[in-house]
Amino acid sequence: MSKKRKPKSATPPKAQKRPEPRLYLFTPPLAGAEEDFPATLDAVLGEADVACVLAQSASAEPAALRALLLNLAPVARKHGAALLCADPDVAKAAGADGAHTRGAGAPLEAALSALKPDFIVGASGIHSRHDCMEAGERDIDYLMFGDPAPDGWRPPFEDTLERVAWWAEIFNVPCVAYAGSLDEIDPLVMAGADFIALGAAIWGDPRGPVVAIRQAEDMAIAAMADQ
């Protein structure tokens, strides 16, 4: 992921065209080495510009996550996508590109300590503006809004839109916005998201994930063109 840093200057720079948002893909929760999923992921990544893949393990065991990362790494590398996971230690040991943490405080500090400056560290699940700003002052590569908590809870969509717009206006640290459905892509892009994260909206689409990811990218590009 491209990396931007620190709050924006109070003096507006010369107007520049905003880059088109890229996609960030959550895998479904997977067993350590599912034989068929790499082929599915290969097909999906071949259809759209996906910047990051967040590997989600169905097991809490580090060994299962390590096996999953080793299984997916060649596919992500083939398509130029960064491969991330929730455990910074496993990410480093398995040759992934970094970690995605939830919450402010200890989890984020542990990831930064273990992985920086050589790996990606991103964060989500940070709800107060104060905590978001403190995270933005650290050496993080992105902040994500609107993604599901482990129990499936998501903040109200209106709250996510407000937070994305606020963050995009103030900070240069990239903003990732999670779209729970394809219909959420347009307003999130309009609010200022640099990346659109997708999970169930892709894997649960009855037309199949290849068709869904292609449409998601087309919708993000179209929303950007409408600005």
Image (tube, rainbow, N blue to C red):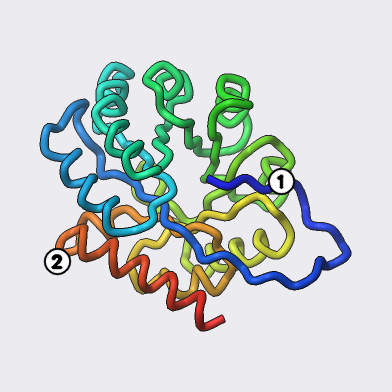
> In the figure, 90 relative to 176: above or below?
above
Give the vertical position of 54 relative to 169 (above or below).
above
Q: Which quarter of the picture shows residue 185?
A: bottom left
Q: Secondary structure at mark 2?
A: loop
* Residue at mark 2 to residue at mark 1: CA–CA distance: 39 Å
Question: Which residue position holds label 1?
Answer: 5
Q: Residue at x 14, y 65 (%)?
A: 206
Q: Considering only order in the chain, which callout, 1 or 2, is on the residue closer to the N terminus? A: 1
Amino acid, disc 2: Arg
Q: Nearer the viewer, residue 38 or 124?
A: 38
Q: Nearer the viewer, residue 146 or 53?
A: 53
**Along the line of sight, the residue nearer the viewer: 74 or 183:** 74
Residue 46's spot in the image, x, y percent? 27, 53
- Binning the other alpha carbons within 10 Å of mark 2 as few (below 14), some (14 to 19) or many (20 upward) gives few
- Residue at the spot x=21%, y=59% of the render? 210
Outermost residue on the front side: it is 78
Which residue is denoted by mark 2 in the rendering?
207
Kindly tell me whether residue 23 is visible in this rendering: yes
Q: What is the crowding at mark 1: few (fewer than 14 residues within 10 Å), some, or many (at least 20)?
A: some
Horizontal and vertical percent position of residue 56 = 31, 37
Up the image or down, 72 lies above or below 181; here it is above
- Rendering quarter of residue 90: top left
The residue positioned 87% from the left and 62% from the top of the image is 10
In the drawing, does residue 213 fall left or right of residue 18? left
- Indicate the amino acid at tag 1: Arg
